[in-house]
Image (cartoon, helix red, strand yellow):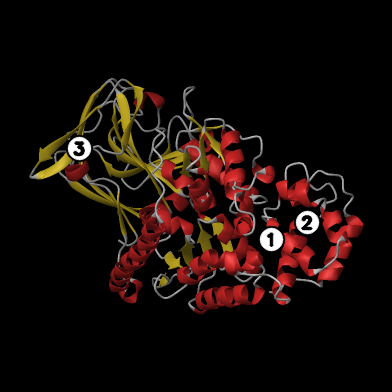
């Protein structure tokens, strides 16, 4: 794991290969003061010159713009490591950061929640749980709709020690974390902190590391933004400078949440450091104020979003700044940024989060008897929520949907008269995990002129369907569970308008009209049967009663809908 090379060789290589073209000097206050990387390298490995590296944020902008494809940041990191080896660096100015790291990985704040069968864990890092503990739980819940066995690990990756050049301390912290996880069968880590992502990828070779934003972005459907969609700009964190997939996922999620992204002058690989990088503030007070001020000015009045909680904490006092997660469920209404939290509040948030998962763990363990306990994902609760979260989509006219009481139960009544509009609930889930769709329904009768094989007869008294997004909207697929008019129960047929929607007759004809019928479908098996391959992530559940093609009239009632991991 020890990646430091002989410091003389590292500096000699830089002195020989750097052309001093100035590309890296122009955007960097540190290099403007100290000279080009070659100039620094030619000063040699004296103690005083090694300490110069602590004025560098290690942000990697110099690496990104170097036409010779050199990595000056690696040289400055090696210089720090050498300064520690020689004990020439006074660590007292960095004690706040080191104490923060030590406490974050202590038993007081560390916690592993590993359900039975778990191989993947969510690792939120340090800053994010301190400022947004409720969002940690919310994200874990979202992840568990994809994989019910995903666990949670509250700990520190040791990046502070790594950046300060404290190699042995870093390796101790990092090995304790990764060895513990590997011993528990963990093979994959999902991160919300870009710094953790970079550190785990570079040093945790046996563990697959993916940002949570990439996972969540894959579950989003295409969104067409109105011309007046609110505008935001993205601050890409330094550790994600070369992480193109994470950068793209952040923008895709912002778009899916209803926001138009306008880029800053420096973004992606040329993003600027917020001022926190490398703990330069420890030896150059005012660095954070200067660098964060420049980034805030570059935002030019637009709300800044970022995937890094530490960056948002730094930029927040200087401009409107939100974490990407703040946009989830905001529906295009820019949230009001919350005031900065005190250090005490952040530690309390992390402590309470540690306790809250403990209760969650007890629940998970109690429900994991022999791995047979069901995990359910409610799609609707008409009694408690009504139609909250359901979006109407009209094809022709409007089907009347209203909440009613029927036989002592709160249900949804639908009535269509030469009309077709449906209700959709956006809900991202993995059909390989939540493979069973359960609901009950009742119809007053089938559609007299309905015929599943013709466009003119493509009407149904009741249907419930599962939506699967494609990369483009025309690639979207759907399983339509229909109360068929003529198609025999158990058979399926492509929709008369598109082969991407398969009509599966779960009931047929009027023989059960007026009766409540309970249904349970295996989504995974149905998708394989009608499309001949495994399904992608699903993005929603919809219901519709429609009579627009025949001009007939139909009435149906729908009970609550649930997704489950077991029958």
In terms of sequence position, does the residue under pointer 3 or pointer 2 come before the other?
A: 2
Q: Look at 86% across and 69% down and name the residue there.
A: 9
Say whether residue 163 is left or right of residue 362: right
Query: Which of the 4 image quadrants contains residue 359?
Result: bottom left
Q: Look at 61% across and 44% down and name the residue there.
A: 290
The vertical placement of 151 against 421, above or below, is below
Neighbours of disc 2 within 10 Å: few (<14), some (14-19), many (20+)? many
3 and 1 marks in contact (CB < 8 Å): no
3 and 2 marks in contact (CB < 8 Å): no
441 or 234: nearer the eye? Answer: 234
In terms of sequence position, does the residue under pointer 2 or pointer 1 come before the other?
A: 1
Is residue 500 shown to the viewer in this render? Answer: no
Mark 1: secondary structure: helix
Q: Quadrant of the C terminus?
A: bottom left
Q: x, y (%) of residue 279?
A: 61, 58
In terms of sequence position, does the residue under pointer 3 or pointer 1 come before the other?
A: 1
Give the numbered dot on residue 72: 2
226 or 83: nearer the eye? Answer: 83
2 and 1 marks in contact (CB < 8 Å): no
Which residue corresponds to mark 1? 54
Query: Which of the 4 image quadrants contains residue 161?
Result: bottom right
Please identify the residue farthest to the right as the structure is shown.
Answer: 16
Total labels: the figure holds 3
Q: Nearer the viewer, mark 3 or mark 1?
A: 1
Report how far apart the C-alphas of labels 3 and 1 lie in the structure.
Answer: 64 Å
Mark 3: secondary structure: strand
Q: x, y (%) of residue 451?
A: 34, 30
Q: x, y (%) of residue 106?
A: 45, 74
The vertical placement of 515 against 372, above or below, is above
Q: Nearer the viewer, mark 2 or mark 1?
A: 1
Which residue corresponds to mark 3? 412
């Amino acid at each position: 794991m020890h990646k430091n090379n002989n410091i003389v060789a590292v500096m000699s290589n830089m002195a020989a290969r750097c052309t001093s073209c100035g590309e890296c000097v122009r955007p960097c206050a540190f290099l403007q003061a100290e000279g080009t990387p070659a100039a620094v390298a030619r000063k040699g490995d004296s103690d005083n010159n090694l300490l110069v590296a602590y004025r560098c944020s290690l942000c990697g902008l110099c690496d990104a713009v170097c036409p010779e494809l050199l990595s000056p940041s690696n040289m400055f990191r090696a210089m720090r490591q050498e300064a520690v080896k020689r004990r020439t660096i006074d660590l007292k100015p960095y004690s706040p950061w080191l104490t923060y790291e030590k406490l974050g990985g202590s038993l007081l704040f560390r916690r592993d929640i590993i359900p039975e069968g778990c191989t993947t864990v969510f690792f939120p890092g340090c800053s994010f749980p301190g400022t947004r503990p409720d969002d940690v739980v919310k994200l874990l819940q979202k992840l568990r709709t994809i994989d019910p066995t995903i666990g949670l690990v509250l700990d520190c990756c040791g990046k502070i020690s790594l950046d300060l050049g404290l190699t042995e301390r870093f390796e101790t912290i990092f090995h304790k974390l990764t060895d513990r996880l590997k011993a528990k069968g963990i093979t994959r880590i999902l991160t919300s902190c870009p710094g953790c992502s970079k550190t785990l990828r570079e040093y945790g070779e046996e563990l697959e590391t993916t940002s949570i934003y990439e996972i969540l972005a894959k579950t989003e459907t295409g969104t067409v933004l109105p011309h007046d969609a609110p505008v935001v700009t993205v601050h890409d964190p330094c550790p994600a400078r070369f992480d193109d997939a994470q950068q793209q996922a952040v923008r895709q999620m912002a778009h899916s949440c209803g926001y138009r992204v306008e880029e800053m002058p420096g973004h992606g690989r040329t993003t600027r450091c917020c001022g926190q990088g490398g703990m330069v503030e420890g030896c150059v007070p005012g660095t954070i104020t200067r660098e964060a001020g420049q980034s805030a000015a570059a935002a030019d009045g637009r709300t800044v979003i970022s995937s890094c909680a530490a960056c948002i904490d730094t930029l927040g006092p200087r401009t409107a700044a939100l974490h990407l997660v703040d946009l989830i469920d905001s529906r295009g209404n820019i949230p009001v940024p919350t005031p900065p939290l005190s250090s005490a509040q952040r530690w309390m948030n992390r402590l309470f989060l540690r306790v809250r998962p403990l209760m969650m763990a007890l629940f998970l363990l109690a429900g994991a008897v022999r791995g047979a306990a069901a995990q359910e994902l409610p799609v609707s609760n008409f009694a408690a929520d009504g139609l909250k979260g359901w979006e109407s989509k009209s094809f022709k006219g409007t089907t009347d949907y209203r909440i009613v009481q029927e036989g002592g139960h709160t249900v949804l009544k639908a009535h269509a008269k030469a009309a077709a509009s449906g209700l959709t609930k956006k809900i991202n889930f993995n059909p390989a995990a939540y493979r069973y769709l359960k609901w009950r329904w009742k119809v007053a009768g089938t559609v007299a002129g309905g015929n599943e094989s013709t466009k003119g007869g493509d009407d149904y008294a009741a249907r419930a369907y599962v939506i699967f997004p494609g990369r483009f909207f025309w690639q979207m697929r759907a399983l339509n569970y229909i109360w068929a008019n003529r198609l025999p129960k158990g058979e399926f047929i492509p929709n008369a308008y598109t082969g991407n929607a398969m009509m599966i007759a779960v009931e047929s004809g009027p023989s059960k009209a007026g009766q409540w019928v309970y249904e349970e479908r295996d989504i995974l098996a149905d998708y394989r049967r009608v499309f001949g391959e495994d399904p992608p992530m699903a993005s929603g559940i919809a219901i519709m009663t429609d009579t627009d093609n025949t001009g007939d009239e139909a009435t149906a009632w729908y009970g609550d809908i649930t997704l489950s991991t077991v029958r």
